[in-house]
Every structure is written in structure tokens, then in C-alpha cells.
Image (spheres, grey):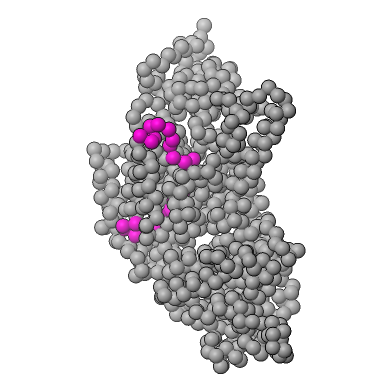
Amino acid sequence: MKLRMNPLGGDIVASADERRDSAQHVAALEAALEDRRAVVREGWGAQRVHDKGKLTTTERIDLLVDPGTTPLLVGTLVNWGRSFAGSRRQAPGAGVVTAFCRVHGRYVMVIANDNTVASGAWWPLTPEKIERAQQMALRLRLPVVYLVDCSGLFLPEQSRSFPGRTGAGHIFKKNSELSAAGVPQIAGVFGDCIAGGGYMPIISDRVYMTERAYMVIAGAALIKGAKSLQLTSLDIGGPEVHVHRSACADVRVPDDRTCLEHIRREVERLPDSGAAFYRHGVEPEPPLLDPAQLDELLPRDHRHIYDIRQVLARLVDGSLFHEFMPDRGLEVCTGVARVGGLFVGFAANVLEPQPHPDGPGHRPGGILYREGIAKLAAFSRACNDDGVPLVWLQDVAGFDIGVEAEALGLLGYGSSLIYTNSTNATPMFTVLLRKASGAGYYAMAGLPYEPIIQLSTPVARQSVMEGRTLAIATYNSKLDDNFEIATDDPAERAEIEAGMARTAARIEADMDPIQAAARMDTDEVVRLSELRPWLEALAEMAYQSTGYRRVKNPRIWSLHDLEVLGSAGRSPTAPRDRAAGAGPALAQPVDDLGEGTELVAPEPGARPVCAPMEGSFFCRPAPDLAPFVAPGQRVEVGAKIGLVEVMKTFSAVRAPLSGVVLRVDIDDGASVVAGQAIAWIRPAGTSEAG
């Protein structure tokens, strides 16, 4: 490869208190996530299954996977908190377990009915969850292992799982598509296998049945009622029938453990993974910077910014990264790194304010502008052309809006990016780090654009707009130009306030990643510390199967052409501070503040702390809290002086030097322009003016 990898990251800019606050917030959310995972894992309890002499689904998967490996579950929280007519209990995980698992060193997709939950019945969203797993396997050409123990549809809710485009019958279409694509399918039948459950294993390349298993279109109870016959389901469709007479199954085995041993042997006969070949002789290595520090990086308040390159530095091998076009489209970061020794492309939002390309001052990050959109589209096309898997790290507030944005043709540039991501053949994976808002969520390969998988962190938020913003839009006719309630009637004011609060609260609840996962609006919620292991696994899965997609050797990448064109006019040896993780300046030098900016220092030698962009300035973290700084207070370089808010994103204004705060010039909530002095600091070591 001709591209030089550069070190990323370094010390986190936030103070120790800020890092601790972030870590505590994430820890609380992740503890709640673990509680929910435990409920799903428990199902309805193991005792009834054990009383039948069978293993639970979790126990079967534990015996199937390679020792020391952990299944990567997807769809864990589907149907979380949802009740169903005809059942006093809920259906944890929609009554089915779907997971990427290692078997004899190869990744497979396991689809296993949870036999503790209504004997593995199919509930609303169970078919969709199975089909989603099948689609993931088809896109990556991963072998599929079905562990079938299914009593058929949960009949009281049949109208919500039987008909429709993605109803239960669509599972069998996916079986057929997998077979047509040459993806191996192996089924073990362990117990009930009724109606749709009976069809599910039939198209598989190998079908094993235990002595307790049966496959029937209709069970014994239905046949007795219809034909007055005294039969058991084993008589109708047990292994004696389907292995020895109908040939609908291949092998008869005595019990669960034996069946799983045979399935493992079948997987062992399949081709090895191609991942080692595509490492090109490079050994995997962990990030130089600890991934556990990700908990400290994302601020508690979702409106506050952080350095995305610090995140990348804790995800990629050796914390080494090659950034493409670092001087263009500064609101996004695109580049290539190794993950588990394998090449992976990354496209991520940059949250810090960036210099405005057409004038003085800065503009907020986390928003897609023309240059960034074009950069993302070009990078996405190059990764697709080279066969480099692409990871999208989203923290996006949406597209730029306004007269200038429309005149620059953002609709057209956005359509180009959407077209590219809609037609890519290279594997794409999406991670919602935090905000996933509006059309920005779509453009950066959100779930509607069919990434192979979309992961959400516990702090992720999916929405068209934030709760407060939507409440303002809903009640706009009742508000004045400053979005304040425009009435002097106390009763009417109270009614509007309550309505806006209800609207905002409902939207905030809908944005919760647990609820998104329950609706299948995201595939899995993962802890921040789990992101690196997930990316390692996804990278390996992207390279495991060979021959079905284009994968260029790195010498002939189209990305090299993009690199040359993107660096035109820049010395090949010029420093690339932005690629190395350097954020924007803490404050602008006095000489760079633009025309017409008046600065009146409170004393000779005082240094201003200036607004990096136009917006609203806040000197307090919340209206009822003390200011960040006060006159006479000593601050260190990097200390937070205040916040500038643009489009509901808050950028910290930090001290450019250590010293004593002399004065804060701007009132809380007041508007500022780029370069305007917010506060003044007497540099450390300078004596007090006379």
C-alpha cells in the first residue's frame, strides 16, 4: 500500500471532572442495558425445558461456538416492553436468538428459536428478526445454522405475523435466496417444528433431527380434531418418518449434544476464512489508546461536542489512520485504517467548529455542508470500487439549511451521496455514536439504506428533530418570533406549556436506543467498550468469504487516485495536524478576528477569549447552575469558559492560555458573532495592572 498511516489521538481535552461525569453517565446507561439483556437471556426460565430432557437455546449456542468465543447477538431487544393479547407474559427477544458466532474459526449466522419462550413460538416481529439475520448472512455470504425448536405462530397475534410482505412466509423466501446464492445452510431440529417451523429447515443443505424432534405441517392436536385419529406428533413427523421415509431430513441423532457436535463438523468441512490472506502479512494489533476511554469521551449532554479522531484512535489498530482530503469538507473525516489487521474505511462526522471556507469565522460541526457531502460521496465510491468495507460513524445533526444551502445545491449533492450508498456492493456497517438526525441520518447510510448492520450506543438518539425543537414546531402558531408563548392568559399559557412539555417528553422517549431496538429501528445496542470487538468481527466477516465480490489488492486502489487529487497543491511532506487529531484553535489570535471587530481590553496585556462562530452564548451549563467562570477565578489552558449554540449543538469555548479571568463581556443567552470577545484573561505570570 502506498498510503502512510499517521498516529491519531492523544490526551483528552476535557477536564477530569468532565471525563468522570461522562463515564458515570455512560455507566448508568450501560448498567440498564445489561439488566435488559439479562431478562432476554433468561427468557421464561430453563426449568420446563430441562424437565423435558432438552437444553435451552442459550446452552445449545454455548456448545456450538468455539470455546472462549462470545456470540455477537443482534436484535436482542426486539419487542422489549411490548405486551400481546393472549399472553400474560412478554416475548423477550421476540422468542428467537440471532447471533454471529465463531465455529471452527469461521463466522456463521445462528438463528435459534428460544425454546423457553412459548416453546419457540413466532410472535409479531419474530419473522422480521429472522429475515434480518438471513439478509445479513446473505450480504456477507456467511453460513447459516438454524437451531429449530418452534411451536409455530403465536396464534392470538397471528394477524400481526402471518400476512404482509415480511410476514412469516418471507422466511422461506430468504431460505431460497440463500440457497440460490450458494450460501451453506445447516439445520438442527431439536423439538417442536410445526407449520412454518416445519418449513424453515427443509431448504437447508443438511438437516439433523434428534429423537425428540418432529416436523409437521399440522400437529397431532389439529389432526385428531380434523380426522378423529389417535396420533402423536412424533408418529406423524418424527425422525422415523422424515429421515427414513420422506427424506425431508438427512441424519438421525440421539440428543441435543450429539446434534451440535455433528453441526460443528459440517461447518468444519466448509472453506476456511479468507481474512488471513487479505491481511497481506500484517498481524492484528490493539489500538495504542485504550478503547475503555471511550466512556469518557462522549459528554453527558448530547448537545456538547467532542473530538471524533479521539474516538477513531481507540477503535483502529495501533491508533494509526490515513485521512483522505483532510483539508476539504472539514465537517467530516474520511480515511482508511486496519481493524484486526484488515483494511476498513471510516466516514465520520466532525463535531468541532471548523473555519468557514468562504469567509471569516467558523461554522458548527456535526452538520453536512456541500464540501463534506461531496467528499463523503467520492470516498464511498472509491471504497466500493476497491472492495474496502466501510464503517459510518454517525453523530449528525442534519444537512445545512437556509438560502445559501439551497443556492449551493445541497439537495443535488445529497442525492449523489444517497445514490452512491444505495448502490454500493462493498459491505457497509453503520454505528450511531450519538445523534442520528434528519436527512443526515439517511445520507450517512442509516438503516433505510440497508447497511449490513446498524449498531447504536446507549447514548444514541434517532429522530427527525429534537423533542424541544419539535414541540416548538408543533405549537409554532402559539409562539412569538423568539419562540416564547404569546399569550397573557395564565390558563392558556399553562395549557401550552404542558402540551409542549408532553410533546418534548414523548419525542425524547421515542429517541431512546432501547425503544429503537424494540421497534427494529436499529439492530443492536452495544456498550462503547464493545465497539472495538464488534468492528474486529465485522471486518473479518467482510473478508471471510471469497469470490463473490470485488476486492482489489492495495497497490491498485482507486483510493490512491483520490489521495493524489485531494492533496493537489500540498507538499507530500507537509504536516497533517488535522489527521493527527488536532482540533480547532481554542481561541483566535487578535490579528485574525476579522474587520470591524472592536476589542477593548480591561488592562494592558489582557488576552481575549473570542467566539469561534456566530451563535448564542451561554455562560452557564444550565439556567439554575453557576457560571463556568467568574471574574477573579484562575483557569488553566483548555478550561471551559462557556458554550456557543448553533442548531442545538453546543461548542465549548475554552481558555487559550492559563491565567486569571478579568471579565466576562457577554450575557447568558446573548447572540455573538465570530471573533467577538466573550471574556478576558490576564496571562499567568503577569502582575496585576496598577
Q: Is residue 73 left or right of residue 364?
A: right
Chain part drawn in magenta:
384-407
Q: Is residue 594 above or below residue 414?
A: above
Query: Looking at the image, which residue is at 40% across and 31% down?
Result: 403
- Queried whether the magenta region covers residue 404, the answer comes back as yes
Query: Looking at the image, which residue is at 37% across and 59% down?
Result: 426
Query: Looking at the image, which residue is at 72% across and 67% down?
Result: 44
Query: Looking at the image, which residue is at 73% across and 66% down?
Result: 86
Q: Is residue 480 left or right of residue 490?
A: left
Total marks in image? 0
Q: Residue furthest bottom?
A: 245
Q: Is residue 167 above or below residue 246?
A: above
Measured as percent of width and height from the top left, residue 470 is found at 57, 38
Q: Is residue 677 above or below residue 53?
A: above
Q: Is residue 88 visible?
A: yes
- Queried whether the magenta region covers residue 60, the answer comes back as no
Viewer-proximal residue, 413 or 57? 413
Viewer-proximal residue, 676 or 489? 489
Tell me where residue 111 sits by quadrant.
bottom right
Measured as percent of width and height from the top left, residue 300 is found at 59, 40
Q: Residue furthest top?
A: 690
Measured as percent of width and height from the top left, residue 648 is found at 53, 34
Q: Is residue 571 left or right of residue 173?
A: left
Viewer-proximal residue, 646 or 157? 157
Measured as percent of width and height from the top left, residue 207 is found at 53, 82
Give the quadrant of the N terminus: bottom left
Q: Is residue 285 visible?
A: no
Tell me where residue 662 sits by quadrant.
top right
Viewer-proximal residue, 96 or 153? 153
